[in-house]
């Protein structure tokens, strides 16, 4: 079973950038969909962005134009480039391996992103 480990979180000022990485224990080539979710204190977990095995991407309206998801199958890693960060982006960010139908079956432990105003 695939295991996922996120890294790259931290504290950044508003307007700054961070790049999150999600490394998989096995090959990600066969994973249908890789998602990034986030959960802010007191809020429900929300889907931020997705990338399919074919490279198709989708973004939440709140991050469109600022965040970019990518996957490197050779390195078994998915990335989340976050630019123009806002305080409301503060959350724990999780990557997940998912099926097109049936939901996600593997989750990382999360990485904290804090954006100061």
Image (cartoon, grey):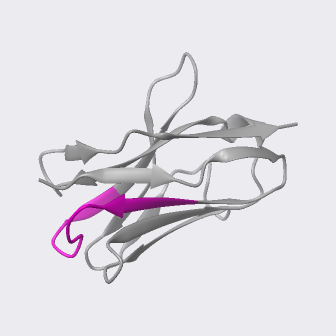
Q: Is residue 64 left or right of residue 84?
A: left
Q: Residue furthest front?
A: 25
- Taking 10 as reference, is 64 above or below it? below
Q: Quadrant of the C terminus?
A: top right
Percent x, y of residue 78: 41, 67
The part of the chain drawn in magenta is 20-34
Whether 32 is drawn above or below 39: the answer is below
Percent coordinates x, y for residue 75 in the rendering: 36, 78
The foreground one among 49 and 90 is 90
Question: Could you say where residue 112 lies in the image, as x and y percent from the top left?
Answer: 58, 38
Side of 55 where 12 appears, left or right: right
Q: At 58% from the left edge and 55% from the top edge, which residue is drawn?
A: 8
Q: Which residue appears at 24% of the width and 52% of the height? A: 3
Residue 76 lies in what quarter of the image? bottom left
Q: Residue furthest top?
A: 42
User: In the figure, residue 73 lies in which quadrant?
Assistant: bottom left
Q: Please report the residue visible at 72 percent of the width from the left and 61 percent of the height from the top.
A: 83
Q: How many marks?
A: 0
Image point (74%, 59%), residue name: 17
Coordinates of residue 58 in the picture (x, y in percent): 43, 62
Most distant residue in the bottom direction: 74
Q: Choose top left, top right, bottom left or bottom right for residue 103.
A: top left
Query: Up-down: is 76 above or below 49?
Result: below
Task: Tell me: 11 left or right of 116.
Answer: left
């Amino acid at each position: 079973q695939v295991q996922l480990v996120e890294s790259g979180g931290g504290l950044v000022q508003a307007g700054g950038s961070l790049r999150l990485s999600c490394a998989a224990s096995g090959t990600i080539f066969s994973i249908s969909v890789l998602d990034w979710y986030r959960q802010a204190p007191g809020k429900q977990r929300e889907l931020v962005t997705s990338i399919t095995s074919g490279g198709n991407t989708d973004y939440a309206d709140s991050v469109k134009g600022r965040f970019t998801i990518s996957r490197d199958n050779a390195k078994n890693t998915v990335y989340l480039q976050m630019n123009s960060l806002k305080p409301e982006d503060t959350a724990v960010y999780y990557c997940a391996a998912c099926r097109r139908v049936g939901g996600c079956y593997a989750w990382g432990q999360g990485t904290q992103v804090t954006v100061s105003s």
